[in-house]
Amino acid sequence: MSKPAVTLFVPTWNAGPEFPEILDLMLGQKLDRPFEMIAIDSGSSDGTVELLERKPVKLVRIPNREFDHGLTRNRGIEMAEGDVVVLATQDARPANDEWMQRLVDCFDDPEVAGAFGKQLPRDDASPMVRFRLENWVAGTADKVVQQFPDPSQFEKLEPIEKLRAAAFDNVSSAVSKRVMREHPFEQRTFGEDIDWARRVILAGYKLVFEPRSVVVHSHNYSAWRTLKRIYGDHSNLYDLHGVHTIKTRDELKRFTDEQTARYLKAIDEDPRLSPLQRRLWRLRARPHAYAENLGQYLGARSTELANDGFWGRWLDRVLRKGV
């Protein structure tokens, strides 16, 4: 067999009942060059390992305590024979058989360090999740290429502009193995992708958003889980780019009111919902809007919280635990 030109890497852990179908969709991709698949499993006990062993997949098993979002992906990339490594999460369902090809095509340009694709909500996604995905960079329809040959151009941007310019998401992405040798992911419990994107942009490489590469991926998190995830996100975004979206309690209330109104409108206009479902989702709109905005408000203050005595340290630990 020819040496693989592309490697698909997926970290797994108790991937669940939908994973067999997702795995078949991944392995069934139509690609114009040979590809291999590698999985690193961190202690599954639900049959994920046994499934992978029956498939044409290079499988490595590690203890759960050894998993790290950045370092485990580095290990998979180091094992890869392909010059392009496609990265996906175990719950990213390819929308068609061109998902990988569209990402791989981006690397015809040798200046591209990474590319990421579009995410569509699952059929069971809540109206709030649908609204957020449709209004996020990975939900848009236009291809975007970002590059800053002069790093000072990037540093002059406002924090939100930096966030948009260095957007990246390892739910569905691809990276150049050559660039990864120079700029590997760093050890991080959260946000290894946005940290890496900032570093390669500052090194002068290109990042591409390719909307023709599509996966179905969303989560109906509770308001509490949403708060914790956004707290972690905005802790990272403040550290990396200085993003501080909500600075005062007055802004927290105003932005919560505005987001609640947007959610109520999305719920009322969602044709999938029955009258009962619409009433139930309307009850959840404000708690979710508040959780999102509180996560942003507190996340940018995470360092301050962690250094603010017992209760601040306690709150920081609680919000980071299990994310």
Image (cartoon, rainbow, N blue to C red):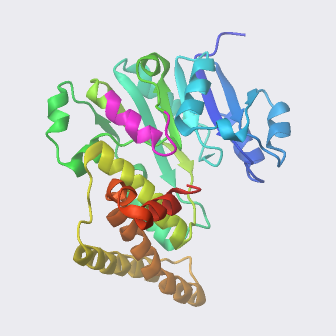
Along the line of sight, which residue is nearer the eye, 315 or 237? 315
Residue 317 percent coordinates (x, y):
50, 58
* Left or right of residue 269, residue 100 in this image: right
Residue located at (56% from left, 80% from top): 273
* Left or right of residue 60, residue 268 in this image: left
Q: Is residue 150 above or below residue 322?
A: above
Q: Predominant secondary structure in magenta?
A: helix
Which quadrant holds residue 295?
A: bottom left
Q: Is residue 155 above or below residue 216?
A: above
Does the magenta run of residues contain 195? yes
Residue 249 percent coordinates (x, y):
26, 75
Along the line of sight, which residue is nearer the eye, 29 or 315? 315
Which quadrant holds residue 241?
A: top left
Give the magenta range.
187-200
Q: Is residue 78 visible?
A: yes
Along the line of sight, which residue is nearer the eye, 261 or 144? 261
